[in-house]
Amino acid sequence: MSNLDTPTPNSSPPSTTDQGEVDSTKTLSPMKEMAFMFLRNYEAMFGLILLLGIAAFTFLGPLLYPTDPFEMVWAPFTYPGEEGFLFGTDYLGRDLLAEMIAGGRVSIAIGLSAAAISVVIGVFVGALAGYYGGIVEEALMRFTEFFQVLPTLLFSMVIVALFGASLWTVTFAIGIVSWPAVARVTRSEFLRIRELEYVTAARSSSARDGYLIFRVILPNALPPIIVQANLMVGSAILFEAALSFLGLSDPNVMSWGQIIGSNRTYILDAGFAVAIPGFAIFLTVLSISLIGDGLNDALNPKLRQRG
Amino acid sequence: MSFWRVTAKRIGYGFLLLMSVLVLNFVLMSLAPGDIADTIAGEMGGADEQMLAEIRETYGLDQPFHVQLWRYLSRVFVLDLGFSYFYNTPVTTLILEKLPATLLLVFSAQIVAIISGVVLGVMAAKKPNGLFSLSVTLIALFGFAAPVFWTGILLIILFVSIFPLFPIGGIMDVTLAGSWWEHTLDVLHHLMLPMITLASIFVALYSRLARASMLEVLGADYIRTARAKGVPERSVMYRHALRNALAPVVTVAGLQFSAVISGAVVVETVFSWPGLGSLALHSILARDTPTIMGILFCSALVVVVFNILTDMTLRLLDPRIKSG
């Protein structure tokens, strides 16, 4: 189970030609260099534009299309484009376009906040394990493995079932089961960085542990954590969709997964009511992972040369 | 450390993990609002306080926390996971009934995903900048982003309305009267769509991994040596490179078992596959706590067993792997 703990590829010896090239051209600040690399990456830009489009659709949508998503407006299963309904109506005769607009906000909000929970827990556990090493690391990594043994979806289903299906329990349940990946990334970065000279220098000038962890090591460990955090948002959205699909979501809140879950009994009569929200989830997660790949290339330029 | 000592250590450690799962189970059960007495009273159509107290005494619910915990653990040791008041059956019986269907689905999906992922990855690594390599990258992106139930539902729509080749629900045709191999074929026929759906998520992951790990291995010195001394390209690819490139794929595949089980819960629901996932969902909707906890424990058990097996396989394949 600990076979994944091989050193990260970043630790390979840097080639000297790299250094020479950097010196010969005009030196940019790291932030600017990163931004340029990201902007030059077509897939990442495509992902960013796609995501901005989805955000505009779901956050500005209510202004342009003020239909109540819970209101029954027409006969059920009106096909997309008929009777003036762009996406048609669902099994209760609710306007699917209005549902899509409202559902997107919830899906994205849950994705972001659940990812935030898992990043906070994961960074905390991983940082302590990587910084202190020894018995602290052993105990924390065993704890992490314990969470990896439980199938995540099943575990969060149990939490939601025991403590009731509200927006908060769902977000909490997703966050609490998905932090181990973040903890592993953080720990391996900490293990690498804590041996570097500037950390020894800071330590020898009697910096305290808290300062070393959060002000010295963490900022330098951030690039892979950012990439991982970005992926967590995508998987949290998928997670929420799966939970809602199974019927374990707040019934008073519309989300893309819930639209699919409530219409899935009728897929053979009205496949569009399932296909459209599913496609929206697909596009959102796709755009997020394109951005993630771009961030990865921009933050770890050395990795890119490996093809 | 020798192979068997490491394995023994793994097993002991897996045992401790499972014990912690049981403790967690028990704590969650006691935290949840309502207890068995309430459930039984509900089944009987209501009971007064004195009746409730009697039921609690019968089931030992009036004992202190650690006594109850100890009783729970010692019952699990003799494979007694409690009694489902919803199905009116012991939980162990329920789980053993449903486990084979889930194992069949999970296993076949893993094998299909690993084989097709490795094949795609190796083919993509032959020409890393070619069109095929690009399409493998695209498949990987799509596979990650598509919700698994959506893939399943699209397959159902596709196979019902366009190519009616495969059945879209259940595990067998109950009206079929034939010999055992006809039944086996029938089950495999029903297995196709759920298996493809579940495998689709992991094909993406494995193909991407296999491609990256092949590219890394193909850059190694011993590959250049093999080519320089005139080993045929096919042999370089499959005998020299692939064997070493497989290790990361097998490692990750072993770690994915818990994710595959999570995926199976959704896939079983989509295709009404009568396995543990469907059972979990039904018992959650029915608030049947003993069954839910039994399933959680049983899936952790499956994950631990497969992790140990993967680890042993890797060690046998590649003796260089560090112990610990």
Image (cartoon, grey):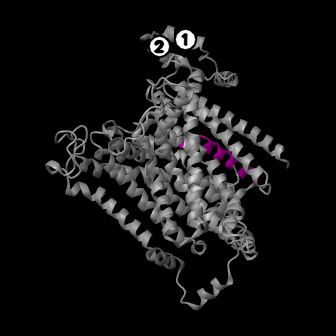
Q: Residue lying furthest bottom in this view?
A: A24
Q: Is residue B130 visible?
A: yes
Dots 1 and 2: beta carbons under 8 Å? yes
Tell me if residue A136 is in the magenta stretch. yes
Foreground residue among B221 and A165: B221
The disc numbered 2 marks a residue on which chain?
B
**Residue beneath disc 1:** B55
Crowd class of label 1 (few under 14; some 14 to 19; many from 20; radius 10 Å): some
Q: Toward the viewer: A90 or A133?
A: A90
Q: CA distance from mark 1 to mark 2?
A: 9 Å
Residue that appears at 53% across and 45% down: A176
Q: In the image, what residue occupies the spot 60% across and 64% down?
A: B212
Residue bearing the label numbered 2: B41
Find residue B206 and report its horizontal and vertical position in percent: 57, 55
Is residue B27 among what the camera can see?
A: no
Residue B243 appears in which quarter of the rendering? bottom right
- Left or right, A72 with respect to B294, comes to left
**Disc 1 chain ID:** B
Q: Nearer the viewer, residue A108 or B30?
A: A108
